[in-house]
Image: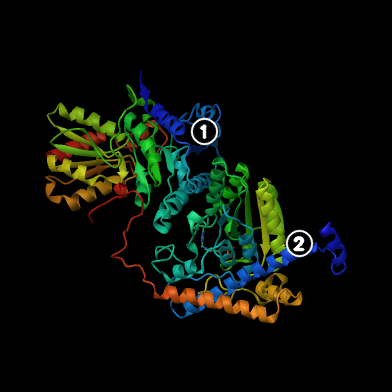
């Protein structure tokens, strides 16, 4: 038996609906036989009547409604059809849910699922990675699972957390990533994981880019380099300690992310390492992100717009030669 | 039946006369609503003078002119119901049970207030007591109310209702549209009271919307609509009571549109010099507090002495609340925990 990343998300929601009557799922086209644009909720509406609800195309109101339900003791999961459309709900997520605990002492346990990241041919409005934007604001946890196992356990963790969680699931990984079985245990929320140990260079990344980084590490191993790959898993909070400990071992740092280049997760990683661990570095740190243009539609352009094995490997070699 | 007999006896005076016992109740309720109106007026006059005296940091926003409609919004809500007040709802908040101390503490930034100096003025609330804490962004609280009501239904609660308010300016946001629509899609027991005070900050109605009357939108959203003179407490009570009853009984969401004039600046920093003199002579520009007081005296619901006594009682409560809050500590940065989330282990901790 094997489980895909997407199936893991569906299974996590099945378990949540089965075991916690406070959970319901709210989103566009998620109910009925259809089961969502990506089928992440397929079959759930039939299995759990009244708890998987289709909404109008109203991202702001979907999150607003979830906030109200959470204040009333429920644990709503909201599926955005694409991360990109959550821009309409930024106000509710960041200004309403994100400020509520600080202002009133009452937390808002909502989970917002964002089908994120690029896939071929998806273009400017169905490809975005918004983790950096959400992380910039106070009051929300931002998860970016990179593996089938994390997709499963982190979604379950997200719903258990009393505060708002933005859960960025990568659309490319939906079908491409498979595991033998669902995990029995979970790695702690908020902790980064060293997915490949090494001694020459640390690549810090998350979500789909973890797999690109691993491929680059494999490629560079043939040239005698041992690359350590750190999967952040949760970009906010950022597990600075694990990153610093890795850089202490390797002396070199490359941060990779699929989001736009201005600010964001990679900039934050480098900023923390240079301010808190400057003496650990043997070479200037570097980062790779998508280009500073909208995400292009055509595969030829798209594959060069985002970080890829070639650009990561090139940058890694540069740092290693310093 | 007693009621029938009494109705016969008293039916001479005015045409739509009600049974006396009912009438007694109506009078009692009228006076009760007036008490909340007066509470708001006296409290807000005090807040305005504290502001002018430099004792309040940030804005002060008054509900002057909206006391009748606002009081009617709070008075019919019971335990288990939800209130989503907005900028000019002091009367409704008080009627719903908000302690005066909550208001004064928030305005004066007392660390003991519900917002503990972290948020101010009208952005206060008591989420655990079903009084939502508004964010500034207009329209954002409508779906939050929908979620509260949806969840109550999921939990099997019965006979609850939610009431939220909005200005005619706030009704023009995309968020308001989404929220009004999703409420009807979910068929939650909701009353939305829109008060058209003719100005959104300095913008008049002509630059806000182009429909003949905002209540016409009720049809478009699948609501039942009602239009009222917001300076007439009798109308406010009667119509909002009906709307609340209908929503509670499972009818579609209710939209009430009240016409008033904002009898203050947008905030106390604003002299509202843009309001033309002619507008102040319009019927909707009447002061609801003065109008209600006049009605009370003319109909003998209370006499001058009783009114005076009521004023004195309220003024005393307000003064006490202010005196208490003024003695309380402000928040101190060193004692602030600077945490934006309740989950300790998930708080991001950069060392800079
Ligand atoms: C989305 C949004 N834009 C702008 C503002 C700034 N603002 C606060 S109150 C206000 C006027 C609101 O007018 P209305 O809704 O009619 O209510 P009123 O103040 O007249 O009671 C404005 C523009 C805001 N709070 N929210």
| Quarter of the rendering occupied by the N terminus of chain B | bottom right
Question: Residue B232: x and y, percent?
Answer: 71, 68
Q: Quadrant of residue B330?
A: bottom left
| Location of residue A198 (image quadrant) | top left
Q: Is residue A127 left or right of residue A150?
A: right
Distance CA(mark 1)–CA(mark 2): 50 Å
Chain at numbered mark 2: B
Using the rendered image of the protein, determine whether residue A281 is visible from the camera's viewpoint: yes
Residue A30's label in the rendered image is 1
**Can residue A117 be seen by looking at this rendering?**
no
Where B282 falls versus A204 (above or below)?
below
Residue at x 37% of width, y 51% of height: A139
Q: How is the image coloured?
A: rainbow
* Residue topped by disc 2: B22
Q: Secondary structure at mark 1?
A: loop
Q: Which of A223 and B234 lies nearest the eye of the viewer?
A: B234
Q: Position of residue B20 (x, y in %)?
A: 79, 64
Task: Quadrant for the C terminus of chain B, please.
Answer: bottom left
Q: Which mark is residue B76?
A: none
Do pointers 1 and 2 mark residues of a single chain? no
Q: Chain of mark 1?
A: A
In the rendered view, would you say A149 is above or below A240?
A: above
Q: Which quadrant does ligand 1 occupy?
A: bottom right
- The secondary element bearing badge 2 is classed as helix
Front-lying residue, A69 or B183 = A69
Q: Is residue B44 above or below residue A250?
A: below
- Binning the other alpha carbons within 10 Å of mark 1 as few (below 14), some (14 to 19) or many (20 upward) gives many
Badge 1 vs badge 2, beta-carbon distance below 8 Å? no
């Amino acid at each position: 038996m094997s489980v895909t990343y997407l199936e893991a998300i569906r299974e996590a929601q099945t378990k949540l609906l089965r075991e916690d009557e406070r959970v319901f799922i709210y989103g566009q086209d998620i109910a009925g036989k259809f089961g969502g644009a990506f089928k992440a909720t397929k079959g759930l509406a039939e299995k759990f009547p009244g708890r998987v609800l289709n909404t109008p195309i109203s991202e702001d109101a979907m999150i607003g409604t979830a906030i109200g339900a959470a204040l009333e003791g429920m644990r709503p999961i909201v599926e955005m059809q694409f991360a990109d459309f959550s821009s309409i709900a930024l106000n509710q997520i960041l200004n309403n849910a994100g400020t509520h605990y600080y202002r009133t002492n009452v937390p808002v346990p909502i989970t917002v699922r964002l089908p994120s990241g690029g896939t071929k041919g998806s273009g400017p409005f169905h490809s975005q990675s918004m983790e950096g934007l959400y992380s910039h604001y106070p009051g929300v946890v931002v998860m970016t699972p990179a593996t089938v196992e994390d997709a499963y356990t982190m979604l379950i963790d997200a719903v258990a957390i009393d505060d708002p969680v933005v859960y960025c699931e990568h659309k490319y990984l939906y079908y491409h990533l498979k595991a033998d079985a669902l995990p029995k245990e979970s790695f702690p929320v908020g902790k980064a994981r060293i997915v490949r140990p090494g001694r020459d260079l640390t690549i810090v990344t998350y979500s789909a880019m973890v797999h690109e980084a691993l491929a680059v590490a494999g490629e560079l191993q043939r040239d005698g380099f041992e690359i350590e790959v750190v999967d952040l898993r949760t970009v906010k909070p950022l597990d600075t300690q694990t990153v610093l400990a890795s850089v202490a071992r390797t002396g070199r740092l490359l941060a990779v992310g699929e989001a736009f280049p201005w600010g964001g997760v990679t900039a934050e990683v480098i900023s923390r390492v240079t301010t808190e661990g400057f003496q650990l570095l043997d070479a200037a740190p570097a980062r790779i992100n998508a280009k500073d243009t909208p995400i292009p539609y055509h595969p030829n352009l798209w594959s060069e717009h985002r970080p890829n094995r070639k650009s990561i490997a090139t940058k890694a070699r540069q740092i290693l030669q310093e | 039946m007693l009621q029938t007999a009494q109705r016969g006896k008293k039916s001479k005076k005015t045409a739509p006369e009600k049974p006396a016992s009912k009438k007694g109740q109506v009078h009692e309720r009228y006076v009760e609503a007036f008490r909340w109106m007066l509470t708001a007026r006296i409290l807000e006059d005090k807040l305005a003078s504290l502001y002018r005296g430099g004792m309040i940091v940030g804005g002060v926003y008054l509900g002057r002119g909206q006391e009748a409609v606002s009081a009617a919004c709070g008075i019919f809500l019971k335990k288990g119901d939800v209130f989503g007040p907005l900028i000019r709802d002091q009367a409704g908040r008080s009627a719903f049970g908000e302690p005066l101390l909550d208001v004064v503490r928030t305005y004066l930034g007392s660390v003991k207030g519900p917002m503990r100096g972290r948020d101010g003025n009208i952005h206060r609330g008591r989420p655990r007591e079903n009084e939502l804490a508004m964010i500034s962004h207009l329209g954002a609280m409508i779906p939050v109310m929908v979620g509260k009501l949806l969840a109550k239904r999921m939990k099997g609660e019965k006979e609850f209702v939610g009431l939220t308010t909005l200005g005619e300016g706030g009704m023009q946001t995309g968020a308001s549209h989404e929220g009004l629509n999703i409420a009807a899609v979910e068929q939650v027991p909701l009353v939305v009271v829109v008060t058209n005070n003719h100005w959104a900050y300095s913008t008049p109605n002509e630059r806000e919307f182009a429909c003949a009357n905002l209540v016409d939108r009720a049809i478009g959203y699948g609501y039942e609509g009602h239009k009222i003179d917001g300076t007439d407490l009798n109308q406010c009570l009667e119509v909002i009571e009906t709307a609340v009853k209908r929503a509670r009984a499972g009818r579609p969401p209710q939209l009430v549109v009240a016409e008033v004039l904002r009898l203050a600046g947008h905030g106390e920093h604003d002299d509202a010099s843009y309001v033309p003199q002619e507008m102040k002579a319009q019927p909707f520009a009447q002061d609801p507090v003065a109008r209600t007081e006049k009605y009370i005296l003319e109909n003998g619901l209370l006499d001058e002495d009783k009114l005076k006594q009521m004023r004195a009682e309220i003024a005393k409560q307000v003064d006490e609340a202010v005196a208490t809050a003024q003695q309380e500590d402000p928040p101190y940065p060193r004692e602030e925990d600077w945490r934006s989330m309740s989950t300790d282990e998930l708080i991001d901790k950069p060392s800079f």
